Image: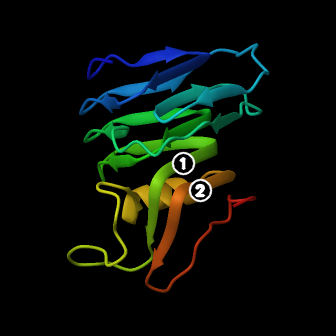
Amino acid sequence: SNPGEPLSGPEIILVSKKSLSLADGSSILSSGLSQNSLPISLTGDGVALAVSSNPLFTSSRSGLTGSKSPNLFLGAGSTVSGATVLLDSTYATSIDSTSHLRAENLSMISGQVSILLAPQFGALPGSFVAPHLTLSDNLLADAMSSKNLLLRSYSAIDIYGSGKMGSDSLQKL
């Protein structure tokens, strides 16, 4: 989408075998009513970004081969919003710290996931997928503000620091 002109619809599903990038300042928003109640089935390695106005929207993935090509990138100031938001990369994920995720149901799936409950300096000691989904600061707050949060990794989820995960609005993690 073009910065300043959101891509919107009841349900938007973008998929790629290699790379999917949301440019700086771009927005993808669900609007209107989605009539689809069927889950999407993804096969093989790749990237998917989906927004839906349907709170029951679900997805599944099978047939992974271990490719290191898939990369999901959300640029500075980008926004992804819907009743349900899916971000799924079987390998690399890079989300700019100024991006905004707004969803009642948020699924974040990546080759590796790191949760930073306290500031970390330098490289994370357990990193083996570069870049990987790193939840900290504003992005962690956005994730915790959803009602239902799914965090999944195709390899590892690492938690750094001590602190609290969750919020008054988070019903299911």
In-front residue for pair 81/63:
63
Quadrant of res 18: top left
Quadrant of the frame with the N terminus: top left
Q: Amino acid at mark 2?
A: Leu
Q: Amino acid at mark 1?
A: Met
Name the residue at 39% across, 80% down.
118
User: How many marks are shown on the rendered structure?
Assistant: 2
Measured from the top left, where is residue 114 in percent x and y? 44, 66
Name the residue at 59% across, 29% down.
43
As helix, strand or loop, the secondary structure at mark 1 comes to strand
Measured from the top left, where is residue 45 in percent x and y? 48, 36
Kindly indicate whether the residue at mark 1 contacts the one at mark 2 (C-beta within 8 angstroms).
yes
Q: What residue is disc 2 on? A: 151
Measured from the top left, where is residue 87 in percent x and y? 50, 40
Quadrant of res 20: top left
Going from N to C along the chain, the mark reached first, 2 or 1, is: 1
Number of the label disc, if any, that sits on residue 108 = 1
**Which residue is at the far front?**
65
Name the residue at 76% across, 13% down.
35
Q: CA distance from mark 2 to mark 1?
A: 5 Å
* Left or right: residue 124 compared with residue 168: left
In-front residue for pair 25/96:
96
In-front residue for pair 132/167:
132
